[in-house]
Amino acid sequence: MKKLIPLLSILFLILIIFVGCGASDENDAKKVAENFVKNFYTIDSKKITKYNTLLQAENGQLSTATDSAGIAKLMKYENSIHSLSTENIKPLMTEKEYTTLIMNREDIMNIQGCAKNNFTMQVTSFNLTKASNDNESNTVSYSYKTNLKFISLKDKSTHSDVIEGFLGLSKKNGQWKISIFQTTVRSNLLK
C-alpha cells in the first residue's frame, strides 16, 4: 500500500502535465488563428495610401511596359502590392496556403475594396468555434465569425458587417501555421 500511493501520485502528475500541455498547445493554435484574422481584416489609412500610390505607379507602367525591363518593373509593383497586403500574415501561413492566397488574389481584395470605397476596416469582435482536432496529425480547424467596422475616410461615418469563414491549422516544427483559409460569407461593403 505504501508503494502504491507514490506510484499513483506520479501517475497523477504525469496526467496533469499531459492535459496541461494539450490545452496550451490548443491555445497557441487559437492565438495564431486570431492573429491571422485580425491582421487579414484590418486595413488602415496608411495601407490605403501606399496601395493607391503603388497602383497608380503600376498603371503608369502598364502603358509603357513593352520590353522585358518594363515588364519586370510592372511585376515589381505587383509584388509590392501583394507584400503590402500580406506583410503581417505571411509568417502565419504555410507556404502552400500563402501561394494559394496570392494566386486567388484574396490577399488584395480587402485593401482594394477599402481603397475603392474610401474607408478603413477594423475587427471589432472575433469568434472561433472548433470544427475538428487531430492530435496525431497535428491539425486543428475552426470556423470563425468576425464583426467588422468600416470607417469612411471622407466623413468618418461608420458601417458594420460580418464575415465568416474557415481556418485549418497544422503544426510543423513546433509552430502552428494556417494551412487552409476560406471565406464563406463575404462583406457586401468590399465589392
Image (cartoon, grey):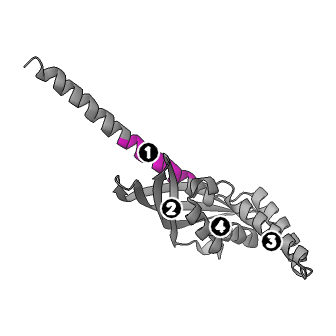
| Sequence order check, earlier mark of 1 and 4 | 1
Residue annotated with mark 1: 27
Residue annotated with mark 4: 107
- The residues colored magenta run 22-35
Q: Is residue 154 visible?
A: no
Give the Cα separation between the discs numbered 1 and 4: 26 Å
Is 19 magenta? The answer is no
Residue annotated with mark 2: 179
Closer to the observer: label 4 or label 3? Answer: 3
Question: Does residue 62 appear to the left or right of 122 in the view shown?
Answer: right
In the rendered image, residue 49, in percent from the top left (x then y), is placed at 81, 61
Q: Which residue type carries mark 4?
A: Asp
Q: Which residue type carries mark 1?
A: Asn
| Sequence order check, earlier mark of 1 and 2 | 1
Residue annotated with mark 3: 75
In the rendered image, residue 71, in percent from the top left (x then y), is placed at 85, 76
Question: Does residue 8 appear to the left or right of 46 in the view shown?
Answer: left
Q: Nearer the viewer, residue 155 or 66?
A: 66
